[in-house]
Image (tube, coloured by chain):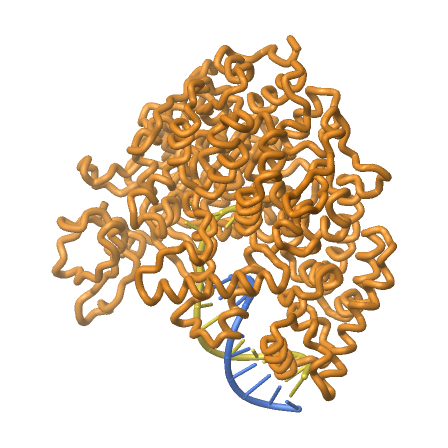
Chain colours: A orange, B yellow, C blue
Amino acid sequence: MQNLLHNLNPEQLAAVTLPAQSALILAGAGSGKTRVLTTRIAWLIQTGQVSPGGILAVTFTNKAAKEMLTRLSAMLPINTRGMWIGTFHGLCNRLLRAHHRDAGLPSTFQILDSGDQLSFIKRLLKANNIDDEKFPPKTLMYFINGAKDQGLRAAQVDAYDDFNRKLVGLYDLYDSQCQREGVVDFAELLLRTYELLSRNQPLREHYQDRFRHILVDEFQDTNDLQYKWLKLMAGEGGKKGGAVFAVGDDDQSIYAFRGANVGNMSAFEREFQVQNLIKLEQNYRSHGHILDSANVLIEHNSKRLGKNLRTDAGHGEPVRIMESSSDIQEANWIIEEAKNLIREGSLRSEIAILYRSNAQSRVIEHALFTANIPYRVYGGQRFFERAEIKHAIAYLQLMDNPHNDSAFLRVVNFPTRGIGARSLEQLQDVARQQNISMYAAVPYVAGKAGSSLANFVKLIEGARFETQNLPLPEMVKIVLEVSCLLTHYQTEKEGADRIENLEQLVSAATLFVSEEGFNKEAPAFAGPASSAAVLLDSGNGDQIIDADAALPTVMSPLSAFLSHASLEAGDNQAQAGQDAMQLMTVHSAKGLEFDAVFITGLEEGLFPHENSAQEESGVEEERRLMYVAITRARKRLYLSFSQTRMLHGQTRYNMRSRFLDELPEESLKWLTPRVQPTWFGNKKSAWDEAPDDAANRIAQTFKKSDNSMSWRIGQNVEHAKFGEGVIVNLNGGGGSGSLRAQINFGKFGMKELDLSVAKLEKI
DNA sequence: GTCGATTATCTTTTT
DNA sequence: GATAATCGAC
């Protein structure tokens, strides 16, 4: 045990060894949060305070859950498979599979990912003749998800006006359609579980009794429903059930846009009568200048619980800031700089390039590709989201649950088999009249269309029959054959990649089967609690099995694999083993760390993003995002912005991000001359100053050749009333008439001014 | 009904 | 710039 607690600092040690009461750990970036969580679990088990089965540990991402399991296995000689460590969604899925009858779901219920959900809604609107101009599918989707994230059913939502009443009605319709098809969306997984446990006392008490310790990672990211869910699991603020050990950092709350509520942290402190509040402020990751930058930046936020990171690592190198004239130059510069780092001995995998939105990766990827530097992009399109994979999955879904209309529509005519829009419309009408799924409605359609449809049904039934006793990978293989997906892509010109992906799907199935223990005889769960896999009374007279053990006991391999495909979209490219540079959004970088980090596109409108600029809370969230980005870096941090950038297929001119001006001067080193904000009175052009030689050299390299024109697009200007701006477009002039300029003044928006009249100063 | 081509739309982050 | 939706020709 000494080993376990060895090397913990006093705060970490205190947190790990807290008594079995609810506790809140404020863990700053790089303060050893995951370490504290896993060590806590290991310590609880090793000191015999709880069995592995009495632990419930919740994370938000699959990555975090996996990390926790790996570290735990390294600390303790136990089999972690079957332990209740996972994402909210994953754990709820497991519960619902085990108790699907009580939850009112078919055993083969399927999970809609957000793409599926959106097309589901589009279909719903069309089927009910709703004008999707007036009720855009996305609006409805946000409405439904928002309500569910607060734990509200349609009947519980207050509607103030006609528009909202209509949305509520559609929400209700949506839910009943989901029920009919046997599908659930992400939020539904949580809401169903919550409702199940609220209403079913024996079940609730069983789990409350069982989970003596509930540990929550990234608590600041919980939404209202997740918090209610935790309260239910813990039973009246932990009085009846287990103790809740919540770890979070309000400064890293970056998911408010999808319902996360930082207020849950103070609510938790109050409602769980938290007496143990521990702050982890010692940072083990970043050098001083980097940490100072993060600290000073985040102080610009008003709503904080208050926390400051410190380090013993010394100041280290200053934070470098670079201004480029275009996104392409930005990318080229990054690559030059990265090459230097690599030449000096840095691993490529220790260099990360971060950006605010996925669209920004294109230019950088292109440059990396040209420079022949291996790289890996996280996010973007993932394995299970690829079209060909979705198609294959849809066939499997239909075999497992034929009432899933989304799956039906996706593949009924793919590859084409002569079933067109008309016949499907007909089929849809029948299905609606009879209140059955499209699949079930097939026998009611007569004629030529009817027989093509019947053939499709035969195909699915045949595949199901043929594969019923085969292992999952074999099943997938056969489905690829009989669906004609393989032959279809063989004849297609660009089909080679897709076939390769389909083959990878078979490998994914093989891997899944062995990882989840579906190829073993007995459930893999081992440990003192396995005997607790008792039968218990569900309250409706049925004897049911606790959702205790590993997946194999509560669902079929196919159902499990399909959930896996929805819940874990899978990595996009598995060039594992290669030492490659890391590209990702700031959001997906959370929880990771690198020796060197480039934060790119630090421009107004991009970072902070324009969609967030409307409200102050939006900007504060962006600032927290920036805080997260900065604290990813261990030794070296580069911040970069560009005067122009291609976005949506057209060039945009942005001003540098306000965040750059919120950093402590003494920790920064500007590689290009810094143009002071106008209120400091410095109105020289960035390219006309030469503070130091290195900067001058770089400036020369990037200097634009055509400086002759008095006004040019991209010119920074200052206006007496509107302040600092940048010329976006010029028109008129050409000898006659007056020259007019469109100028982006940031806060004041876009203005068109006559250059002969307006008093503009170049800066 | 099918295919290819054009047009519209939309681009923040993710389980 | 990329994809989905729509349109028009066979």
Q: Nearer the viewer, residue A286 or A86?
A: A86
In the image, residue A286 lies at what x, y percent? 48, 23
The image quadrant that residue A742 belongs to is bottom left
Residue drawn at 82 percent across, 67 percent down? A482
Residue A404 vertical position relative to residue A334 in the rendered view, above or below: below
Q: Nearer the viewer, residue A37 or A548?
A: A548
In the image, residue A434 lies at what x, y percent? 62, 76
Q: Nearer the viewer, residue A214 or A116?
A: A214
Residue drawn at 75 percent across, 27 percent down? A79
Residue situated furthest front in the rendering: A541
In the rendered structure, the answer to whether residue A734 lies left or right of residue A14 reads left
Q: Is residue A309 visible?
A: yes
In the image, residue A553 lies at what x, y percent? 76, 42
Q: Quadrant of the C terminus of chain A?
A: top left
The image quadrant that residue A677 belongs to is top left
Residue A201 vertical position relative to residue B6 in the rendered view, above or below: above
In the image, residue A389 lies at what x, y percent? 69, 58
Q: Is residue A697 visible?
A: no
Residue drawn at 29 percent across, 61 percent down? A729
How many marks on residues? 0
Q: Nearer the viewer, residue A523 or A684?
A: A523
Q: Quadrant of the N terminus of chain A?
A: top right
